[in-house]
């Protein structure tokens, strides 16, 4: 039995990870670090089974207090400003939340002298725009961050490495490639498309799907496979190391959209919205996960079709219960 602390537990990946850990039935105590104002909707099925503690990652004192109180054996650091397009509009907030927030967490661990394994959740966005010669992308690929978000993840990645080198704090870094699934925020492509389809089916909006760049190539992983990978990682992988994790199903964003449209109950048009186009974009992301697979044996299992259907069904149910959400944007 372990004490496990998840930062960002109310978010997309954090809530799925908490569910997965509880469903293991191994007696783990699951704590979640969240801000008081964070919506708790994603935890509706497990709210009484997790122990929530309030703190902002920019409040070092609060983090120190919680580390002293909980003394976690494992920390999954998932909290972040995670939307690329928002980072262009709020670069300072993105850098502060992701780099300073991560540094505060690691400082709290150092100050309290606890010794958890810490998962530092970096991102494939650190690799930026690669050439065909770089594919599949390995952990040795140079950093070419193409957004303030990507820059913040380079900083988070490197501060995790530095705390391992300097203080022996047992960080393990991941660079997760595109992952999605039910409860994904609607600012992310496939979830945004699915929400618009569901809203149109319910006659809450016009039968038009607004899109950004559909030509980007992505290798997709289901979030439920991703959280399994994270748990295996903290139990099998080496501190100080970095690992690419990703799916094995590669599509363009447009191909994924067409799959979703084929599951729709009505005909829908597609319209490119200039506001959804990034000032600079990353259009080719195909990972090499050989290092991680060799050390863990993990393989993704959930097919893309199931992932997309589950996202669409999630939004159908969510908007049926809460039609006002068709008018809002969630992250």
Image (cartoon, helix red, strand yellow):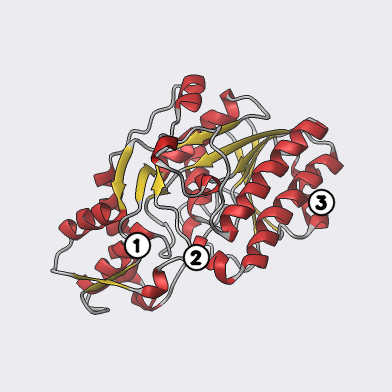
Q: Distance between the residues labelled 3 and 2?
A: 34 Å
Q: In this view, does 301 lie above or below 36?
A: above
Image coordinates for residue 86, horizontal then vertical, percent: 53, 67
- Do the residues bearing badges 2 and 1 touch, measured as CB atoms within 8 Å? no
Disc 3 designates what residue?
65
Q: How far apart are marks 3 and 1 (CA)?
A: 44 Å
Image coordinates for residue 26, horizontal then vertical, percent: 54, 30
- Do the residues bearing badges 3 and 1 touch, measured as CB atoms within 8 Å? no
Q: In this view, does 17 lie to the left or right of 319?
A: right
Disc 1 designates what residue?
213
Q: Is residue 324 left or right of residue 263?
A: right
Residue at screen point 75% across, 33% down:
164
Residue at screen point 54% across, 46% down:
123
Query: Could you say whether the residue bearing mark 1 is in a helix, strand or loop?
Result: loop
Q: Nearer the viewer, mark 3 or mark 2?
A: 2
Q: Is residue 221 above or below residue 151?
A: above
Query: Could you say whether the residue bearing mark 3 is in a helix, strand or loop?
Result: helix
Q: Which of marks 3 and 2 is nearer the N terminus?
A: 3
Image coordinates for residue 13, horizontal then vertical, percent: 49, 49
Disc 2 designates what residue?
85
């Amino acid at each position: 039995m372990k004490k496990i602390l998840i930062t960002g537990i109310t978010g997309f990946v954090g809530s799925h990870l908490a569910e997965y850990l509880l469903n293991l039935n191994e007696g783990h105590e699951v704590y979640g670090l969240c801000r008081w104002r964070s919506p708790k909707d994603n935890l509706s099925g497990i709210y009484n089974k997790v122990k929530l503690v309030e703190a902002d990652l920019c409040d070092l004192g609060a983090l120190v207090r919680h580390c002293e109180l909980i003394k976690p054996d494992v920390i999954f650091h998932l909290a972040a400003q995670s939307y690329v397009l928002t980072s262009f509009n709020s670069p300072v907030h993105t850098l502060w939340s992701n780099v300073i927030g991560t540094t505060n967490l690691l400082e709290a661990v150092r100050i309290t002298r606890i010794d958890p394994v810490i998962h530092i959740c970096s991102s494939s966005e650190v690799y930026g725009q690669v050439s065909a010669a770089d594919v599949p992308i390995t952990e040795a690929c140079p950093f070419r961050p193409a957004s303030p978000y990507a820059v913040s993840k380079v900083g988070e990645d490197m501060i995790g490495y530095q705390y391992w080198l300097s203080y022996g704090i047992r960080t393990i870094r991941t660079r997760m490639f595109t992952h999605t699934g039910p409860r994904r925020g609607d600012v992310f492509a496939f979830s945004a498309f699915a929400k618009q389809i569901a809203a149109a089916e319910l006659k809450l909006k016009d039968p038009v799907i607004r899109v950004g760049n559909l030509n980007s190539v992505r290798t997709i992983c289901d979030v439920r496979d991703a959280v399994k990978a994270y748990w295996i990682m903290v139990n099998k992988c080496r501190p100080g190391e970095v690992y690419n994790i990703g799916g094995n199903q590669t599509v363009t964003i447009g191909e994924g959209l067409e799959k979703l449209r084929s599951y729709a109950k009505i005909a829908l048009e597609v319209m490119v919205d200039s506001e959804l186009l990034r000032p600079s974009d990353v259009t080719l992301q195909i990972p090499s996960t050989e290092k991680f697979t060799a050390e863990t044996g993990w393989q993704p299992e959930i097919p893309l079709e199931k992932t997309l259907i589950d996202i669409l069904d999630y939004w159908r149910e969510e908007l049926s219960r809460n039609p006002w959400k068709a008018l809002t944007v969630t992250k």
